[in-house]
Image (spheres, helix red, strand yellow):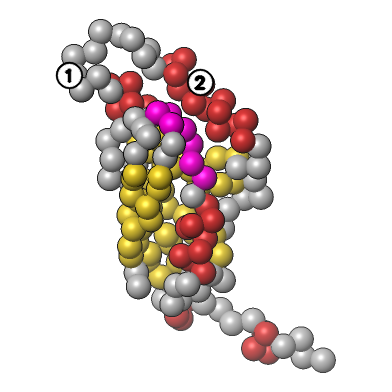
Amino acid sequence: MTGGTVTVQTRAQRELVDITASVAELVAGLPAPSGLLCLFNPHTTAGLTVNEGADPAVARDMIKALEHLVPLHLHYHHLEGNSPAHLMASMAGSSLTIFFTGHRLLLGTWQAIFFCEFDGPRTRTVEWKVIFDPPESIIPAPNGGRDGG
């Protein structure tokens, strides 16, 4: 399989949901060990980002800062009343590209993948597609991975 959908259930109007485990699980089951993973969020009031996942305070601080930067009660013209969510989603972005090798995501020690909900709670989706490295670009370990001893 080279693509699919990850479902995300959000619980609050604004929250960052760590989806790293779900994404890592799909990468672990791919037919080739390395390449690029493309994630796309098809929602206009939500986003995707990579940031620190070790301390949950970081996600809360990000939401707090976005609420400070985007006026929540400005006289917006959009009749649905969720213009702040649209602005926050544009600031977060709608897609990510992440390298993987050995069926593992190449994230930094503290990095996590977050689905950014700005107009919840809702059931959301993230679309994914992979671009595999060509087999000839994968350099085998010396001696076929044996230590030669």
Dot 1, crowdedness within 10 Å: few (<14), some or many (≥20)? Answer: few
Classify residue 55 by image quadrant: top right
Query: Is residue 78 positioned above or below 37 on the image?
Result: above
Residue visible at 45% across and 76% down in the picture: 32
Look at the image and give the residue range highlighted in magenta.
12-18
Q: Which mark is residue 62?
A: none
Secondary element under disc 2, as helix, strand or loop, is helix
Up the image or down, 36 lies above or below 70; here it is: below
Is residue 15 shown in magenta? yes
- Earlier in the chain: of badge 1 and badge 2, it is 2
Which residue is at the front of the view, 140 or 96?
96
The foreground one among 55 and 2 is 55
Q: Residues within 10 Å of mark 2 (few under 14, many from 20)?
A: few
Amino acid, disc 1: Leu
Name the residue: 34% across, 69% down.
2
Q: Position of residue 13 (x, y in %)?
A: 40, 28
Q: Find disc 2 in the rendering and name its residue.
A: 65
Instruction: Give the residue pinned by disc 1.
Output: 79
- Left or right: residue 94 versus residue 116 is left
Number of the front mark, 1 or 2: 1
